Amino acid sequence: MTIVMKQVGVPTKPTLSLEDFKRWLKQFDHNGDNRINRNELRSAMRTASVRFTWLKSGEGMREADTNKDGVLDDGELENLVAFAERKLGMKITASSAVP
């Protein structure tokens, strides 16, 4: 699954369900520990055409990693969703019925 954030020079908000967002993010769990570290988050951001991924991945980790263990587990993904909507211009819905 690829997320495209621009369309012919016009910025758009990709819309994903929460389940699709989690599924998309899990494909970057390169070490298979069911958690996302900063490098994995940066890889995900790159595929979504996010600029300055080194900076934004750090910012995303600081905001989403509430227990400060350096990785995002399932319980912290809600925080990452809020960051993605607020800072990356994504729209993530609660249900799989995306308009």
Image (tube, grey):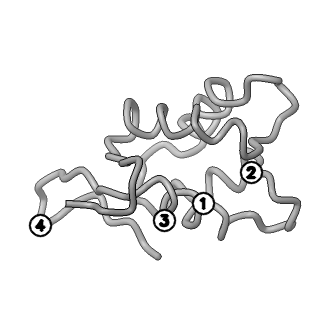
Front disc: 4 or 1? 1
Residues at marks 2 and 1 touching, judged by CB atoms closer than 8 Å: yes
Q: Residue at x 58, y 31 (%)?
A: 79
Lower sequence index among marks 3 and 2: 2
Report whether 69 appears left or right of 72: right
Report whether 24 appears left or right of 27: left
Q: Identify the amino acid type marked 4.
A: Val
x and y percent of residue 27 in the render?
65, 70
Where on the picture, by quarter, is residue 55? Answer: top right
Lower sequence index among marks 2 and 4: 4
Q: CA distance from mark 2 to mark 1?
A: 8 Å
Q: Identify the amino acid type marked 2.
A: Ile
Residues at marks 3 and 2 touching, judged by CB atoms closer than 8 Å: no
Dot 2 falls on a residue whose secondary structure is strand
x and y percent of residue 80 in the render?
57, 38
Front disc: 3 or 1? 1
Q: Residue at x 42, y 50 (%)?
A: 50
Of the numbered discs in the image, which one, if any, rests on residue 47? 3
Q: Which residue is mark 4?
A: 8
Q: Quadrant of the C terminus?
A: bottom left
In the foreground, 31 or 98: 98
Q: CA distance from mark 4 to mark 1?
A: 25 Å
Q: CA distance from mark 3 to mark 1?
A: 11 Å
Question: Badge 2 local density, few (<14 within 10 Å), some, or many (20+)?
Answer: many
Lower sequence index among marks 4 and 1: 4
Q: Which residue is mark 2?
A: 36
Number of numbered discs overlaid on the protein picture: 4
Residues at marks 3 and 1 touching, judged by CB atoms closer than 8 Å: no
